[in-house]
Amino acid sequence: MPLSSLIARLPYPSPVLQRTIGIAAVVTQAGIGVTGSVVRVTGSGLGCPTWPQCVAGSLVPVQHPGIAAINQWIEFSNRMLTGVVIVVAALAVLAAWRIQLDHPERKRLVKLAWMMPAGVVLQAVLGGMTVLAKLEWWTVAIHFLASTPLVWLAVLLVKAFGEGDEPARPLVPALGRRTLVLLTVLMWAVLIAGTTVTGAGPHGGDLDTHRLAAPIEKLAQVHGGLLVGYLVVLAVFGLTLLRGRTAKRIWQRYAWVWAVALAQGVLGTVQYALGVPEAMVSFHVLGSALVIVATATLWTGTRDRGPVRSRTPATPPERELAAAN
């Protein structure tokens, strides 16, 4: 029996379920980065020194000379959380696929849904490379940065569940659209610069991990300078919104970006001034995820793809027509 026939037997996902799955994708894609930072700041990055096994000969933590049990379990727990990400990613694919069977035009929704499990596979491979490379700072940076577009795509997936499939119609002036593109580029520049600060910082995941041989003060200045640039462009984007009749919901999303970005800036400044305490590192990673979510939400709010027509199953005539096509 074709797999699509089995998917067709599943109940049609309700709008509430669709949105719940989309939000769960955002939370899990962002959350795995936060738990990864906990592994790093607790020095548990090599708590499981092999991959895919935890220690040679065992998939789960066992007593091992030179490795504390708590470090093993912290690292192992982070690996197990990947299972939750996989489940949510699979649910996203099943829901999108089930919707497309009744509404064949929902191709974009299915493509976005498939990005979730594809990202999990990529992250699993990168995670294994990071462990095998003994947490070299640049492998940790790549592992983290690879998760950031997945958070962005998960936000787009939430939006796709609740919108139509027409070509995107801009809701802001052309200058605003170009400014928003620049804002997004700067956001990722801030994230990349942040990984270099982390690479030179005190929390490498293991005491013997090589660190980036560069002055952390200079790296932090570059990181902070890029954030200032991000805020300046964000202000310019706000000015472009004044040129037209901007919907209230866009202003609300714009305000949230300001709130999250400023909070992240204050947190980073305090964290640096206090000598980078462990707990604040994880909060800063959470803040970076929230900046991505807020910026992506602003991005999706500035374009319209028409009303969604797939909140309910297709009627029998519509289903027959879909099958014929």
Image: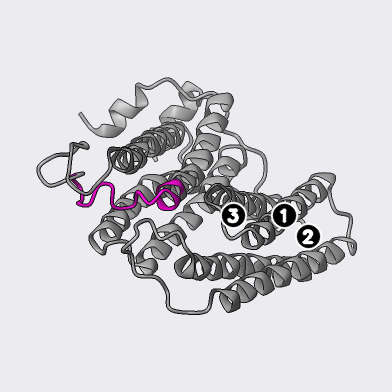
Tell me, yes or no, if residue 106 can be seen here: no
Q: Which mark is residue 172?
A: 2
Q: Nearer the viewer, mark 3 or mark 1?
A: 3
CA gap between label 2 and label 1 equals: 6 Å
CA gap between label 3 and label 1 equals: 22 Å
**Amino acid under label 3?**
Ser
The quarter holding residue 60 reads top left
The one nearer the camera, 193 or 270, is 270
- The magenta stretch spans residue 97: no
Image quadrant for the C terminus?
A: top left
Q: Which mark is residue 288?
A: 3
Query: In the rendered view, does 18 fall on the left or right side of 224?
Result: left
* Earlier sequence position, callout 2 versus callout 3: 2
The quarter holding residue 141 reads bottom left
Residue 181's x, y, as percent? 65, 68
Dominant SS in magenta: loop
Question: Would you say the residues marked 2 and 3 are in contact, meaning their CB atoms lie under 8 Å apart?
Answer: no
The one nearer the camera, 181 or 55, is 55
- The magenta stretch spans residue 39: yes
- The residue indicated by pointer 1 is 302
Residue 44's x, y, as percent? 35, 48
**Amino acid under label 2?**
Val
Which segment did they paint magenta?
38-53
* Earlier sequence position, callout 3 versus callout 1: 3
The residue that appears at 62% across and 76% down in the rendered structure is: 222
**Amino acid under label 1?**
Thr
Question: Would you say the residues marked 2 and 1 are in contact, meaning their CB atoms lie under 8 Å apart?
Answer: yes
